[in-house]
Image (tube, helix red, strand yellow):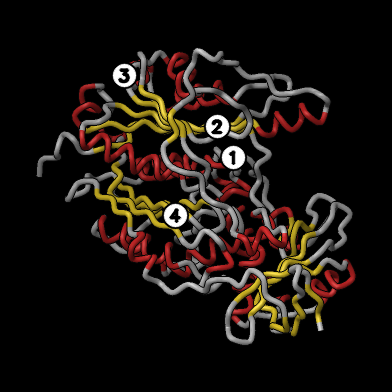
């Protein structure tokens, strides 16, 4: 069957790690290097749209304009993304829609961070230097909104970062499964050791040294406890200098540009949705309807199901994110023939802030080209299991063409559990996490508390001795007195 010449196709995918401390590099130059690995000059010069993932390492007025000038693209349209780990897959989906509709010809997607270099220079009293664009350069157009990161219930108690929220999801998973603390700790460290094993074999991974489950689980001088039950080796690793780039176009343009068809990868389908922006409003802390519904729809649009997917990369900022996604998609966590990552995950492959998924897509593309006829699934997550984007890929053209859907109406129809922001009384501990200081001492404990009528409120144990109890004992279901100011006391 002939392929529609407007069918979107991924024709370039490049990644780069920068490890030379003697040669600091700014993010845009790292993106240039990734773009040159993704495609030849004749392809890059044909780029008419550049879309850059939101950067944290440097601040440019229009990074896409700098990137375009340095790769020889002639006056491309430039755009800048909002914040969120879901963004790279969302950019692919949008690029495919634009290419299919004739709104873009050759699209370059890029992202890069030099957070490791920036941090090292700041610790030495210096700063990362980057190209300054003067006020005559318009700010890049931003398409979409940042992912809201908290609601009033979380803001009231200072529950304000991923390193606190995801371990709270982890405890909810353990409690729902009826696991002991010890058995659960062994299980998630074994999951993460399997991710490490993939990173060891991934030439693009930042950490390729083997790390065993025991080393991941046990706190130590190089693996301090961040927030119970997560050690440092269970957290996303943003101390990297990494960039990735993707080039998409139509089948007709790919042919005109003489890109060998054996290097083509077809995006088959995508889907998107978000869960409640406030975690306190979620029906269950160990579930995610947006993943279940949007993931199933992406597979359906691609004309396949999860059993026929050969490669999977689940967004892996923390172990809880992987476990929730695997459960919602119907994936076993320990299948040796189908690991839940193609890269090694954000701990070991590298977690360059919003751009990890650009790397997972590039790695998947390499695997598919090396193994024609197979298919892969990419999941992307922004916020706290909040905003999700999915992509299904293969080396064969999609029979029905690229398809995409926003399934938010179906997700919105799911039950939620609006939080009680200001509530006082005696409730039961639903889940919790306990942040540690750098000397290995528990600081406080954030609690999700079920009220007698089944609602939820959020609270914090501010007493260090009480926080230590939450690490030494399993307090699931324990009675807790929540005070008017959001502080709490274990009873």
**Front label number (4 vs 3):** 4
Closer to the chain start, of discs 1 and 4, is 1
What residue is drawn where x is 28% and y is 48%?
A: 268
Residue at position x 74%, y 60% in the image: 227
Residue 475: name its quadrant: bottom right
264 horizontally vs 153: left or right: left
Q: Residues within 10 Å of mark 1 (few under 14, many from 20)?
A: many
Mark 1–mark 4 Cα distance, whole angstroms, equals 18 Å
Q: Are marks 2 and 1 in contact (CB under 8 Å)?
A: yes
| Residue 347 pos. (x, y %) | 63, 49
How far apart in space, not on screen, are marks 4 and 3 (Cα)? 31 Å
Quadrant placement of the C terminus: bottom right
Rate crowding at label 3 as few (under 14), some (14 to 19) or many (20 or more) other CA atoms within 10 Å.
Answer: some
Q: Work out whether mark 4 precedes mark 3 in sequence or the reverse, and give the earlier one.
A: 3
Front disc: 4 or 2: 4
Q: Is residue 247 above or below residue 298?
A: above
Cα gap from disc 4 to disc 2, whole angstroms? 21 Å
The residue under label 2 is 112
Which one is nearer the viewer's eye here, 172 or 10? 172
Tag 4–tag 2 contact (CB < 8 Å)? no
Q: Position of residue 380 (x, y in %)?
A: 46, 51
First along the sequence among labels 3 and 1: 3
The residue carrying pointer 4 sits among few (fewer than 14), some (14 to 19) or many (20 or more) residues within 10 Å by Cα, namely: many
| Residue labelled with disc 1 | 352
To which residue does mark 4 refer? 388
Q: Secondary structure at mark 3?
A: loop
What residue did someone put label 3 on? Answer: 46
Determine whether label 4 and label 3 are within 8 Å by CB.
no
Q: N-terminal of the two: label 2 or label 1?
A: 2
């Amino acid at each position: 069957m002939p392929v529609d010449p407007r069918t979107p196709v991924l024709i370039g995918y490049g990644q780069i790690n920068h490890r030379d401390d003697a040669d600091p590099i700014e993010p845009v130059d790292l993106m240039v290097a990734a773009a040159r690995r993704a495609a030849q000059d004749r392809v890059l010069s044909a780029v008419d749209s550049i879309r850059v993932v939101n950067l944290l390492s440097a601040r440019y007025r229009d990074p896409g304009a700098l990137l375009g000038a340095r790769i020889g693209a002639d006056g491309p349209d430039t755009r800048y993304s909002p914040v969120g780990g879901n963004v790279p897959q969302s950019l692919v989906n949008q690029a495919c829609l634009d290419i299919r509709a004739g709104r873009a010809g050759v699209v370059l997607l890029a992202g890069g961070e030099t957070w490791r270099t920036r941090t090292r220079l700041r610790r030495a009293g210096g700063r990362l230097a980057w190209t300054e664009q003067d006020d005559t350069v318009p700010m890049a157009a931003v398409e979409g909104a940042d992912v809201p990161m908290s609601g009033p219930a979380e803001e009231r108690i200072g529950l304000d970062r991923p390193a606190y929220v995801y371990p709270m999801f982890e405890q909810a998973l353990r409690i729902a499964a009826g696991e002991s603390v010890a058995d659960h700790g062994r299980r998630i460290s074994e999951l993460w050791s399997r991710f490490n094993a993939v990173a060891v074999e991934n030439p693009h991974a930042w950490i390729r040294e083997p790390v065993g489950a025991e080393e991941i689980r046990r706190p130590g001088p190089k693996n301090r406890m961040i927030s119970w039950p997560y050690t440092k080796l269970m957290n996303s690793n943003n101390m990297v200098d990494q960039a990735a780039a993707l080039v998409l176009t139509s089948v007709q343009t790919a042919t005109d540009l003489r890109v060998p068809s054996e290097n083509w990868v077809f995006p088959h389908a995508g889907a998107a949705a978000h869960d409640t922006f406030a975690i306190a409003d979620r029906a269950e802390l160990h579930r995610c309807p947006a993943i279940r519904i949007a993931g199933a729809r992406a597979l359906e649009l691609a004309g396949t199901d999860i059993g026929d997917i050969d490669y999977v990369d689940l967004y892996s900022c923390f172990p809880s994110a992987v476990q929730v996604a695997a459960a919602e998609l119907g994936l076993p966590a320990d299948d040796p023939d189908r690991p839940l990552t193609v890269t090694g995950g954000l701990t070991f492959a590298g977690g360059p802030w919003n751009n990890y998924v650009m790397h997972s897509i590039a790695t998947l593309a390499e695997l598919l080209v090396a193994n024609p006829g197979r298919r892969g699934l990419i999941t992307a997550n922004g916020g706290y299991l909040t905003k999700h984007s999915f992509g299904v890929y293969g080396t064969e053209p999609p029979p029905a063409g690229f398809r995409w859907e926003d399934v938010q109406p179906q997700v919105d129809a799911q039950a939620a559990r609006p939080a009680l922001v200001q509530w006082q009384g005696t409730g039961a501990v639903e889940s919790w996490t306990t942040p540690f200081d750098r000397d290995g001492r528990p600081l406080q404990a954030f609690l999700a508390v079920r009220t007698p009528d089944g609602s939820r409120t959020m609270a914090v144990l501010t007493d260090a001795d009480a926080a230590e109890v939450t690490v030494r004992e399993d307090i699931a279901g324990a009675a807790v007195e929540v005070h008017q100011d959001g502080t709490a006391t274990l009873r």
